[in-house]
């Protein structure tokens, strides 16, 4: 479930990156972040499948809920990392302008 | 248990190489030793992609390990290290799952670089034809 949620996040961000008008939102970094995690969880899933076989596809509801909650938390953490970097690098100069005004 | 540490270690090495390459390319651009007519993606940019993939994966997986209580904020930071038999399992996991993770990310990055090079070298197509059809 964590892998699935991260892959969906990676696909959505990649589509947003492809249809972007300029690079000011720095979506490329977020794409790599989610794809990196997705690839690593895919390897984890392959090893788990090799161990559990068919049982891997029938997880307990409690485990599935916990994994889904973890997946959403991972997506949120990725977004926070991206946002902090965006605010620090400030490619549009919005923060600089706002600070100078104040 | 600590499979993300392998990717994190690779990320540290690649980041160092990327910074060195960036400096080398900057010096080359100042000396005008780069051929202007050659269309290609700089190696430092490609290495940056790999560092993002590795750091991204390592950080988000580290969060998963904190979630499952396998990483703790006190010494020895990895709960598996408190018990020799657990530590053995952890090292085995790092050598199998961890190495495979780092390898797959590197292979994906390598293929991505080859595809990106091919796209950059491809002649530009007229995109208006698609909208007409």
Image (spheres, coloured by chain):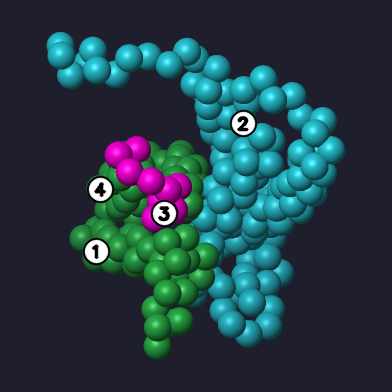
User: Magenta stretch containing residue A20, yes or no?
Assistant: yes
Q: Find chain A in the image and tell me its colour.
A: green
Q: For the residues marked 1 and 3, what is the alpha-carbon distance in whole angstroms?
A: 36 Å
Q: Residue at x 21, y 60 (%)?
A: A61
| Chain that bears disc 3 | A
> Mark 3 — residue?
A24
**Magenta-tinted stretch:** A18-28
Q: Residue at x 76, y 39 (%)?
A: B29
> Mark 2 — residue?
B41
Visible in this render: residue B108?
Answer: yes
Of residue B70 and residue A78, the one placed in the foreground of this image is A78
| Chain that bears disc 2 | B
Binning the other alpha carbons within 10 Å of mark 4 as few (below 14), some (14 to 19) or many (20 upward) gives few
Mark 4 or 3: in front is 3
Callout 1 touching callout 3 (CB < 8 Å): no
Label number found at residue A58: 4
Q: Find chain B in the image and tell me its colour.
A: cyan
Q: For the residues marked 2 and 1, what is the alpha-carbon distance in whole angstroms?
A: 43 Å
| Residue found farthest to the front | A101
Q: For the residues marked 1 and 4, what is the alpha-carbon distance in whole angstroms?
A: 13 Å
User: Magenta stretch containing residue A52, yes or no?
Assistant: no
> Mark 1 — residue?
A65
Q: Position of residue A4 (x, y in %)?
A: 31, 48
Mark 1 or 4: in front is 1
């Amino acid at each position: 479930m964590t892998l699935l949620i991260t892959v969906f996040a990676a696909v959505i961000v990649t589509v947003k990156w492809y249809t972007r008008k300029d690079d000011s939102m720095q979506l490329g970094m977020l794409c790599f972040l989610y794809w990196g995690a997705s690839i690593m969880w895919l390897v984890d899933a392959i090893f788990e499948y090799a161990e559990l076989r068919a049982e891997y596809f029938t997880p307990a509801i409690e485990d599935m809920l916990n994994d889904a909650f973890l997946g959403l938390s991972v997506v949120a953490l990725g977004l926070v990392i991206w946002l902090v970097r965006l605010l620090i690098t400030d490619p549009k100069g919005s923060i600089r302008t706002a600070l100078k005004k104040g | 248990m600590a499979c993300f540490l392998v990717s994190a270690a690779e990320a540290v090495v690649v980041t160092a190489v990327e910074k060195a390459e960036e400096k080398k390319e900057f010096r080359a651009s100042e000396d005008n030793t780069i051929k202007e007519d050659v269309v290609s993606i700089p190696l430092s940019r490609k290495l940056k992609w790999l560092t993002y993939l590795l750091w991204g994966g390592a950080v988000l997986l580290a969060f998963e390990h904190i979630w499952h209580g396998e990483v703790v904020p006190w010494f020895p930071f990895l709960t598996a290290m408190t018990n020799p038999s657990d530590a053995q399992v952890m090292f085995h996991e790092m050598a199998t799952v961890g190495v495979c993770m780092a390898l797959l990310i590197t292979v994906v990055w390598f293929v991505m670089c080859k595809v990106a090079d091919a796209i950059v070298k491809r002649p530009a197509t007229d995109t208006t034809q698609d909208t007409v059809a």
